[in-house]
């Protein structure tokens, strides 16, 4: 929601009259110098939207403000050209509305189009979200990173490294919306005040690493050469439910130089619906973008979300730091998931991250069953994972 600056207004006043944290207001308006607002300058108010209302007989601004649980001055801020003493029946005004309910519904087939729609809604409501396109998929879809917060501790989450694990994106987006609501409305999550996280933590989120693959699993092969190639790799079958790879048949989570040669020797040697690590490490644009992101951001810890198994993998060759064990046991406590330090599988994003930086990395396997997990598990998975999201910020 946008308002126009008046003589004598300050961001501190807006934060108080709309009851939103000043830090969120400042970060929602990065081009504005807080100490020198200019009259008629546009200011974005996070966590609010407006709707149109037609003046009825007997209406006054006082009555309208009271009926809509807003202040008279908030109403005036949103309608600078309206003269309150000269309201005309049929005249249209804007009424501010605090957003208290989520706009993201993760409990649905969650393809790239659904993700893009939800991201656009969140950008509009929460302009303190910083967004960056970190690369393009094989088919040219934007690989989007979101950043939230301004703290020195940089924590990374990602989902849908594997195409038929798209429910991980839906879970991340559901929690993200809950977190944004808690920040703007000063509410707790599981009894924990989240506002300190904003100044302590910078969240880096790539909600969908493999958008081409996710769309292939959910919507079938696209027209043209990419779809034809995928059908050939899939032996002509239009059932792509078992497809883990990107559109080129490369498993993006087997693309990283952490015992890559060992994995390549025992995995498919040509493009496949799953497990083909490529002809060499870091050949695919999606895996390259994620590697470059880690190098650019200096993450304190990473949490790639996968399915399935209700386990958390947290080690690589003993290179993980001692704090990694303390963190994973907190993840296990709040989720009920089993921590597993070592497993005979390599070349993953988590493995490479631990190898290069010796910092905590966790592959979190949500849910149980056969991928793609059914949406009937969505609510259970979400409840199991909320504590992990929170703990990744406070640990």
Image (spheres, rainbow, N blue to C red):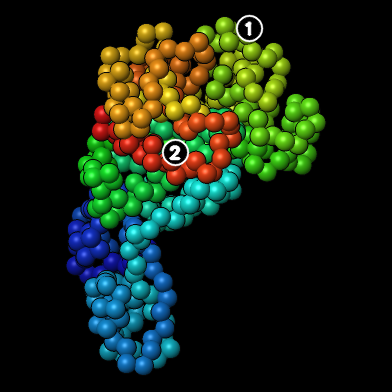
The residue lying at 65 percent from left, 30 percent from top is: 242
Determine the image quadrant of residue 57. Answer: bottom left
Residue found at x 50% / y 10%: 344
Residue 45's label in the rendered image is: none
For the C terminus, the quadrant is top left
Q: Is residue 31 above or below residue 224?
A: below
Image coordinates of residue 231 in percent, x first then y, are 77, 32
10 Å neighbourhood of mark 2: few (<14), some, or many (≥20)? some
Residue 361 seen anywhere in this rendered image of the structure: no
Identify which residue, 395 or 94, lies in the foreground. 395
- Check disc 2 and report its element: helix, strand or loop: helix
In the picture, measured across the screen, residue 12 lies left or right of residue 261, that is: left
Rendered location of residue 352, percent (x, y) = 46, 16
Which class describes the residues within 10 Å of circle 1: few (<14), some (14-19), or many (20+)? few
Looking at the image, is 12 positioned above or below residue 285? below
Figure check: 385 above or below 301: below
- Estimate the spatial distance between the alpha carbons at disc 2 and disc 1, rounded to whole Å: 34 Å
**Residue 328, percent from left and from top:** 33, 23
**Which residue is disc 2 drawn over?**
381
Q: Are marks 2 and 1 in contact (CB under 8 Å)?
A: no
- Write the residue at 27% across / 55% down: 185
State the image coordinates of residue 125 (x, y, percent, origin top left). Answer: 40, 56
Per the rendering, the mark at residue 265 is 1
Asked if residue 378 can be seen in this view, the reply is yes
Of the residues tagged 2 and 1, which is closer to the observer? 2
Q: Tell whether 357 sits left or right of 108.
A: left
């Amino acid at each position: 929601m946008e308002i126009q600056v008046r003589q004598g207004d300050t961001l501190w006043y807006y934060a108080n009259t709309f009851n939103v944290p000043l830090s969120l207001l400042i970060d929602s308006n990065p081009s504005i110098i807080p100490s020198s607002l200019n009259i008629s300058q546009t200011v974005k108010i996070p966590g609010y939207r407006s709707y149109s209302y037609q003046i009825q007989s007997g209406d006054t601004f006082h009555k309208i403000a009271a009926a809509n649980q807003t202040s008279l001055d908030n109403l005036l801020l949103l309608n600078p050209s309206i003269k309150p003493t000269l309201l005309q029946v049929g005249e249209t005004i804007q009424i501010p509305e605090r957003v208290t309910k989520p706009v993201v519904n993760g409990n649905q087939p969650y393809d790239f189009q659904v993700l893009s729609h939800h991201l656009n809604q969140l950008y509009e409501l929460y302009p303190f979200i910083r967004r960056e396109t970190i690369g393009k998929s094989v088919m040219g879809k934007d690989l989007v990173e979101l950043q939230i917060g301004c703290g020195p501790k940089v924590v990374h989450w990602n989902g849908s490294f594997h195409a038929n694990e798209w429910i991980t994106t839906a879970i991340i987006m559901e929690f993200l919306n809950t977190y944004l609501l808690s920040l703007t409305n000063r509410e707790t999550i599981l009894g924990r005040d989240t506002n300190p996280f904003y100044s302590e933590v910078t969240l880096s989120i790539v909600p969908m690493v493999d958008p081409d693959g996710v769309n292939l699993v959910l919507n079938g092969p696209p027209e043209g050469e990419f779809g034809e190639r995928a059908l050939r790799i899939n032996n002509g079958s239009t059932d792509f439910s078992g497809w883990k790879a990107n559109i080129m048949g490369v498993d993006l989570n087997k693309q990283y130089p952490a015992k890559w040669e060992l994995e390549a020797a025992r995995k498919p040697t040509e493009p496949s619906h799953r497990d083909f690590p490529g002809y060499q490490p870091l050949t695919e644009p999606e895996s390259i973008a994620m590697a470059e992101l880690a190098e650019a951001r200096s993450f304190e810890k990473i949490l790639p979300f996968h399915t399935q198994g209700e386990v958390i993998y947290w080690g690589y060759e003993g290179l993980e730091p001692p704090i990694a064990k303390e963190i994973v046991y907190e993840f296990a406590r709040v989720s009920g998931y089993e921590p597993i330090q070592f497993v005979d599988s390599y070349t993953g994003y988590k493995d490479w991250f631990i190898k290069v930086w010796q910092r905590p990395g966790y592959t979190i396997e949500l849910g149980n069953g056969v991928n793609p997990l059914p949406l009937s598990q969505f609510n259970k998975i979400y409840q199991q994972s909320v504590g992990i999201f929170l703990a990744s910020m406070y640990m």
